[in-house]
Amino acid sequence: MKKFIMFTALGGLLIIMISSYMQMPPMGNVENPSYNEVAVYYLDEALEDTHAPNVVADIIMDYRALDTLGEATVLFTSIAAVLTILVGKDPKLGEEDSHHG
Amino acid sequence: MDDLIVRNVSRMIIPFIQLYGLFVIFHGHISPGGGFPGGAILGASIVLYTLAFGAEKGHQKMPHSISKWLESGAIIFYMLIGMVGIFTGYVFLTNKAAGFYMGEVGVVFSGGFIPMITLAIGIKVGSTMITLFHTMIDEEEEH
């Protein structure tokens, strides 16, 4: 019974995924919604706005610098989590020490 | 890994790896590259050093007390650069309008805060890699 419910749910998700994939526009088409005036603006004005010829760096470091800050925060969070798990001290040991002391 | 060939080859090759990493970071706004790949290359050089010379020498080369400050300091430097935009009357992380030195197109010292932010990201990524690797090496040696 549990397996039946699981397969039904996963199959439904698969059907939704495939049907939404069929609705996607073809790759590289000029009519795609992702190809709008923003891309044209970046290519036209990035050199004037930032004085740096690498447009990818202009976008991720200048226009979308807040997103890059979030990305750096992800690194910070990941290392905080890893250090907490790997080198974190056992709290029970500390409690015992404080009781004895 | 205590091997004469590995130690000598890595001793010769590590300065070039670090120079290449610094090149990728400092030319992030001119050529392909940037903070993330450059920092990964810098971190990989220290990882190679630790693999070739052992964890103890690796810790001496890059102690945890330094990499901890580099990690936190890089992201605070990033935020302080962003604050300049607020204090000059614009939004967070404003580049040209906030009065950063724009310079000539195609020179290393140009592009406002883009090289500074790339440097901060590079330091951050490199020290994160080193800290993760050293932590996992320590964990393995204890067991």
Image: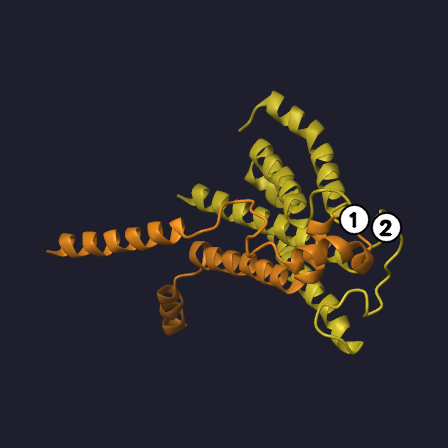
In the rendered structure, the colour chosen for chain A is orange
Q: Nearer the viewer, residue B94 or A11?
A: A11
Q: Chain under label 2? A: B
- Name the residue at 81% across, 65% down: B96
Q: With A82 as the anchor, is A42 left or right in this view?
A: right
Q: Amino acid at mark 1?
A: Pro
Q: With A89 as the anchor, is A47 left or right in this view?
A: right
Q: Quadrant of residue A20?
A: bottom left
Q: Chain under label 1? A: A
Is any atom of residue B47 visible in this view?
Answer: yes
State the image coordinates of residue A24 (x, y, percent, origin top left).
44, 51
- Name the residue at 77% across, 71% down: B84
Circle 1 residue: A53
CB-based contact (under 8 Å), mark 2 and mark 1: yes
State the image coordinates of residue A11 (x, y, percent, origin top left).
24, 51
Circle 2 residue: B105
Q: Residues within 10 Å of mark 2 (few under 14, many from 20)?
A: some
Q: Amino acid at mark 2?
A: Val
- Name the residue at 15% across, 52% down: A3
In the orientation shown, which residue stands out farthest toward the top? Answer: B5
State the image coordinates of residue B61 (x, y, percent, origin top left).
66, 43
In the rendered structure, the colour chosen for chain B is yellow
